[in-house]
Amino acid sequence: MRFADIPGLQGIKQKLAQSVQANKMAHAQLIAGKEGALNLPLALAYATYIQCTDRKTDDACGVCAACAKNQKFIHPDLHFVFPLSNIKNDKDADRFKAGITKSWRAFLTEQPFGKLDDWTNYYGGENKQAIISRDESRGIIKTLSLKPFESTYKVMVIWQPEYMHGSAANGILKILEEPPENTFFLLVANATDRLLPTIVSRTQIVQVPLLTDGDLDGYLQQATDLSETARRNILQLADGDLNLALRLAQNDENINQDLFADWMRACFKKGYGDLVRMADEFHQMDKLNQRNLLYYGIGMMRESLLCLSGTTAINRAQEGELKFVQDFSKVMDVMKIEWANQLMSDASYYLERNGSAKMVFLNLSLQLSAVLNP
């Protein structure tokens, strides 16, 4: 992974590259961003740049031996720690570790912008809680106590450190504060508020935002053959999340517009029979489309708020969507929009944690009906 493989984020890439050129890299960096931000790809590209033997001004060369190995994530001085559940209950720890490391490298190659859900689905652990166990902290200390094999620098990437067992987090505090010479920690987190304050205090924070619509659209134009209308629909749903945008691009038909409009009309009319029927229909949808519908709804709440405030210049809604937003905003106010937005966000949270889709959507529909008819 190189900086050139990552769309946007030019300012952050430049600062990271300059820190290496000036030999002023912090020994422990917390590369933080909300879910959907490209902080893991950025950390991988940063590690490649650190270990490149023929660095350019703004990126790794991509052709030296170190770059070739990092492209396959097999560089002996690049180490990974990530959440995991021992789905096979394999008592041979070394054998299990070797197998899962192979899966991890394949995952990074096939899904470079993947999220934690994608990873657990990839190795088959979606029904078990993934964690970074306390044994991993011992492994980190043991691994980093060894001299580098090839590079001047050793890099330890800890993905999702918020999933570390408490004793594992405490176990790395000393080495995190005083690592061996030329050793760098890159902690890649989506929820820094769940990290121990003692972990955060030992790191330099690099905040990674979601992509802008312009950067995301530019990437979609290069990577897909979608029409402008399809890309516009995806941009609204993805809201800067490249991983979600690419998944939506595989099925670019936007059915959410009419579905969401019908749903809100049923909520407004207190059509409880229709709401029960629609909850059954939503239950039959796959998880991605269920989540997309909620994301679309949250987007429509944003559009309605902009319409209410008169700031239509930055509206994303177009054509039929815009007509719906204009009509919908007539029965909404700021408090209703805030309430509905929170309810949809909560519903998305429950779905991610395997709540019954039928119950989640029916409960959400009844609460939205109450919001629309106070």
Image (cartoon, rainbow, N blue to C red):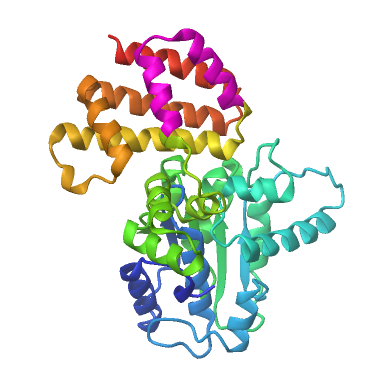
For this view, does 214 lie left or right of residue 89? left
Reply yes or no: does residue 275 show up in magenta.
yes
Q: Is residue 356 above or below residue 32?
A: above
- Looking at the image, which is closer to me, 134 or 325? 325
Examine the image and state in which quarter residue 98 appears: bottom right
Question: What is the x, y in percent for residue 187?
Answer: 49, 57
Q: Is residue 342 above or below residue 248?
A: above
Task: Identify the residue at image location x=27%, y=38%.
Answer: 322
Q: Is residue 317 visible?
A: no
Question: What is the x, y in percent for residue 349?
Answer: 49, 31
Q: Main secondary structure of the magenta part?
A: helix
Examine the image and state in which quarter residue 114 appears: bottom right
For this view, does 74 lie left or right of residue 218? right
Q: Is residue 32 above or below residue 373?
A: below
Reply yes or no: does residue 252 show up in magenta.
no
Q: How many marks?
A: 0
Question: Which region of the structure is painted magenta?
Answer: 258-283
Question: What is the x, y in percent for residue 329?
Answer: 23, 27
For this view, does 321 lie left or right of residue 281? left
Question: What is the x, y in percent for residue 372?
Answer: 30, 15
Residue most extreme to the left = 310
Task: Identify the residue at image location x=61%, y=29%.
Answer: 354
- Looking at the image, which is closer to me, 293 or 138? 293
Q: Is residue 267 visible?
A: yes
Placement of the C terminus among the 4 image quadrants: top left
Task: Identify the residue at image location x=58%, y=89%.
Answer: 64
Task: Identify the residue at image location x=68%, y=46%.
Answer: 121
Placement of the N terminus among the 4 image quadrants: bottom right
